[in-house]
Image: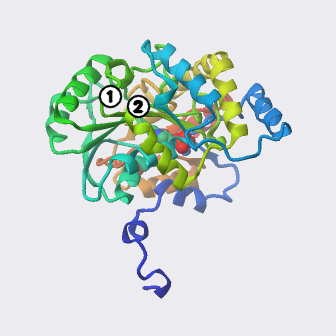
């Protein structure tokens, strides 16, 4: 049925594919006893000391508009944090505070993308990474990661060949949903070629701190020059359990900062000051929290492996980072129907691989940021079903 009310609307918006996971979740709202493992967020609320900083800011009357690029205290704090993490001087002039990682991605594309430009990205991918450039008129080129010896793998040579005509390349490492991480030497090779070609690189590093065998994931900032065409996306959502706060940041080449400032002004104007106060405290005092939650995620990841790895029909590559298992159940040909069946029969909510542009059927994403009890309960139900 055509509705007159939507005639003349932006066709890319009207035609944008709805989120498969959201459809499943909405339809299962009232299922009693359902364990939802489909959304990607920490299971714990934001730590108290971070909330207190916001409460104090509100009590002090910090309820006004602020600078589009963020309050100087937060830009300075982020710049110091990035400088310490990546062992190179990153000035506050390169930092733009944003209203979430999602907002940061939108701003990055708005800054560099023109209608019809080719944008390349890796799949399987967080759906927004494809939806955002598509909504802004990009022609998408996708390249699927391979599985080698039960590990995700990127053939850098093939990827570089495939991205030859791309104006912008978006890389998400550590990756949602696979936990795949590029190593520094691979980043170095990619950066070198993109520098020669003049390709823009948008590097989504929102899971930089959710890693198991090191303090921080390798970053393109480790291998870049300040004026390289590199925009790095970060967020407070995952590492500091602040998904509902909507706070993130961009690290930019200095000459791009004034352009982003204008665009930020025309979209959200600025991030709320009380959230920025909370963000600064999170960065300064949050290292113990990050270490503890990563230990918890590691325990949870072990539980998933103990449950799935003995099953001959389940392929469960070990996630190197982030808090998702992305696994395959052999013999499943209709992933979305099977995800529905899991809701109806064992009452566990998983995200089907199609939501992440996985070409092969039978893949699911499970967020293991859960208490051991809830996760064990869910895994027990799934194992019974998969067996
Ligand atoms: C890869 C990736 N990038 C960006 C985001 C956006 O994070 P937020 O908007 O909560 O900062 C997410 C959220 O799940 C993500 O997984």
Expressed as whole percent of the image width and height from the top left, the position of residue 292 reads 64, 18
Work out whether residue 353 can be spotted: no
Image location of residue 377, percent across then percent down: 64, 35
* Relative height, residue 92 to residue 382 (above, below): above
Q: Secondary structure at mark 1?
A: loop
Q: Residue at left 53%, top 50%?
A: 342
Instruction: Name the colour scheme.
Output: rainbow
* Residue 199 pos. (x, y %): 23, 38
| Residue, far right | 59
Question: 146 or 50: which is nearer to us?
Answer: 50
Number of callouts: 2
- Asked whether the viewer can see residue 174, the reply is yes
- The residue closer to the viewer here, 65 or 134, is 65
Q: Is residue 167 above or below residue 179?
A: below
The answer to whether the residue labelled 2 contacts the one labelled 1, judged by CB atoms less than 8 Å apart, is yes
Write down the quadrant of residue 11 in the picture: bottom left
Cα distance in 3D space between marks 2 and 1:
7 Å
Mark 2 lies on a secondary structure that is helix
Tell me the residue at 45%/49% (across/down).
106
**What residue does disc 1 label?**
227
Q: Is mark 2 within 8 Å of ligand 1?
A: no
- Mark 2 residue crowding within 10 angstroms, few (<14) / some (14–19) / many (20+): some
Which numbered disc covers residue 201?
A: none
How dense is the environment of label 1, judged by Cα within 10 Å: few (below 14), some, or many (20 and up)?
few
Residue at the disc numbered 2: 254
Pick whichever, 377 or 230, lies toward us: 230
């Amino acid at each position: 049925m055509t509705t007159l009310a939507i005639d003349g609307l932006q066709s890319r918006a009207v035609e944008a594919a709805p989120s498969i996971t959201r459809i499943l979740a909405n339809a299962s709202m009232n299922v009693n006893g359902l364990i939802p493992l489909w959304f990607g967020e920490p299971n714990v609320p934001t730590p108290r000391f971070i909330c207190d900083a916001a409460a104090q800011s509100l009590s002090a009357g910090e309820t006004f508009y602020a600078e589009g690029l963020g309050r100087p205290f937060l830009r300075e704090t982020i710049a110091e944090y990035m400088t310490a993490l990546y062992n190179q001087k990153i000035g506050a002039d390169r930092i733009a505070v944003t209203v979430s990682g999602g907002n940061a991605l939108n701003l990055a594309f708005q800054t560099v993308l023109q209608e019809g430009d080719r944008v390349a990205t890796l799949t399987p991918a967080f759906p927004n990474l494809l939806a955002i450039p598509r909504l802004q008129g990009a022609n998408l080129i996708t390249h699927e990661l391979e599985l080698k010896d039960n590990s995700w793998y990127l053939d850098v040579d093939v990827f570089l060949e495939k991205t030859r005509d791309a104006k912008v390349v978006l890389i998400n490492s550590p990756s949602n949903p696979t936990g795949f991480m590029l190593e520094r030497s691979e980043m170095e090779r990619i950066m070198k070629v993109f520098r020669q070609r003049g390709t823009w690189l948008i590097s989504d590093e929102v899971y930089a701190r959710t890693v198991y065998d090191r303090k921080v994931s390798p970053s393109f900032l480790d291998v870049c020059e300040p004026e390289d065409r590199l925009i790095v996306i970060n967020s407070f959502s995952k590492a500091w359990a602040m998904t509902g706060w909507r706070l993130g940041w961009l690290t930019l080449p200095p000459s791009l900062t004034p352009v982003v400032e204008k665009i930020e002004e025309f979209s959200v104007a600025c991030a709320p000051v009380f959230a920025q106060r909370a963000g600064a405290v999170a960065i300064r005092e949050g290292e113990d929290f990050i270490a503890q939650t990563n230990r918890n995620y590691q325990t949870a990841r072990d539980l998933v492996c103990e449950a799935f790895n003995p099953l001959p029909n389940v392929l469960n590559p070990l996630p190197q980072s982030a808090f998702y298992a992305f696994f395959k159940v052999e013999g499943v040909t209709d992933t979305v129907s099977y995800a529905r069946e899991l809701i109806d029969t064992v009452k566990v909510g998983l995200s089907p691989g199609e939501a992440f542009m996985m070409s092969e059927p039978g893949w699911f994403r499970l967020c293991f940021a859960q208490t051991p009890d809830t996760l064990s309960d869910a895994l027990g139900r799934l194992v019974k079903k998969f067996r």
